Image (cartoon, grey):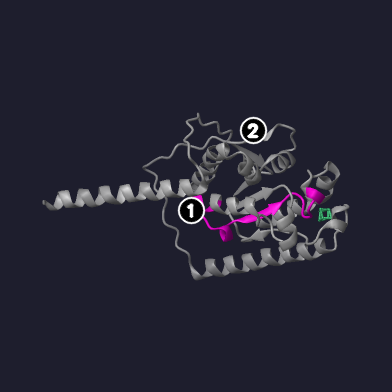
Amino acid sequence: MKPQIVQIRKELLSIINAVKTRIEIEKGFGVNTITLSKPNNVMTQPAKNPLTKKKPIKTTEADRQINVSEKERKSQLLEELRKEMLVCHKCSLGKTRTNLVFGVGDPMAKLMFVGEAPGRDEDLQGEPFVGRAGQLLTKIIEAIGMKRSDVYIANVLKCRPPGNRNPLPEEIVLCMPYLIKQIETIQPKVLCALGTFAAQTLLNTKAPVGTLRGRFHEYKGIPMMVTYHPAYLLRNPNDKAKVWDDMKKVRDFLNEL
Ligand code: SF4
């Protein structure tokens, strides 16, 4: 066989393998259908100019030191906030919680997820998104090529509403300053609101999540994607494809940075 044909065959095989891997990831995330929809981004991204290649950025030792100290500074601020919240009883949920569910992840995260409130598993373990919905969120994160430890995950409410009832408006008002401080400390490049309460609270709107999802909004200058909550997806698996579409937009946005 001619060397060029061998080379073309090799390249074709590597493309087929890459496609296979992508299909496996999408199947793992649970997407069985492909939706064809018009892009409806509010924040229109400029088209890629293939001639303007990004210059590789060299990380010097000085940059590395700055990053380390910045991470330490953010970790310290978050820890101080967590300690402050451990004794919080501003609303009645402080009395019924087993554990405060502060938030988890990389203080330097480029992507921050915001959910609604802790459930039973989260209340018992003191960590957000550790139950079945949390396992699905981990798969979603992995499907866009990231690890759970790369992102930051928090909720609007830090204590579990009894019986997993919906958060009350007064509980959200009292707890929101903590989430705002978390976002201000982490300064993510992108926020992702999971479900109705996170989206409506951060965007100060009553619009349903179904009309908000699928496009970037803005929270205090930070681009914010809205998508369905993983717990909703467990009950409505047919909507996984929509979340996959939303998350691909987040992935592409992060890749453009
Ligand atoms: S839900 Fe928020 S405001 Fe209410 S007690 Fe817990 S930390 Fe405090």
Q: Look at 17% across and 52% down and name the residue there.
A: 6
Q: Which residue is mark 1?
A: 145
Asked whether 30 or 57 is in front, the reply is 30
Relative image position of residue 51 (x, y in whole percent): 36, 42
Relative image position of residue 130 (x, y in whole percent): 65, 57
Relative image position of residue 81 (x, y in whole percent): 77, 62
Ligand 1 lies in which image quarter?
A: bottom right
On whether residue 251 falls in the magenta region, the answer is no
Crowdedness of circle 2 by 10 Å Cα count: few (<14), some, many (20+)?
Answer: few
The image's mark for residue 23 is none
Q: Look at 26% across and 47% down and name the residue there.
A: 12
Query: Quick one: label 2 or label 1, which is nearer the N terminus?
Result: 1
- For ligand 1, tell me if the residue under mark 2 lies within 8 Å: no
On whether residue 162 falls in the magenta region, the answer is yes
Q: Is residue 252 left or right of residue 82?
A: left
The amino acid on which the numbered mark 1 sits, given as a three-letter code, is: Gly
Quarter of the figure with residue 206: top right
Relative image position of residue 141 (x, y in whole percent): 55, 52
The outermost residue toward the top is: 38
Q: Which residue is mark 2?
A: 210
Residue 159 appears in the figure = yes
Secondary structure beneath dot 2 equals: helix
Quarter of the figure with residue 170: top right
Q: Look at 73% across and 66% down and name the residue there.
A: 79
Magenta-highlighted residues: 141-163
Crowdedness of circle 1 by 10 Å Cα count: few (<14), some, many (20+)?
Answer: few
Quarter of the figure with residue 195: top right
The amino acid on which the numbered mark 2 sits, given as a three-letter code, is: Gly
Q: Is residue 139 left or right of residue 158?
A: left
Residue 133 to residue 35: above or below: below
Residue 4 to residue 80: above or below: above
Residue 144 appears in the figure = no
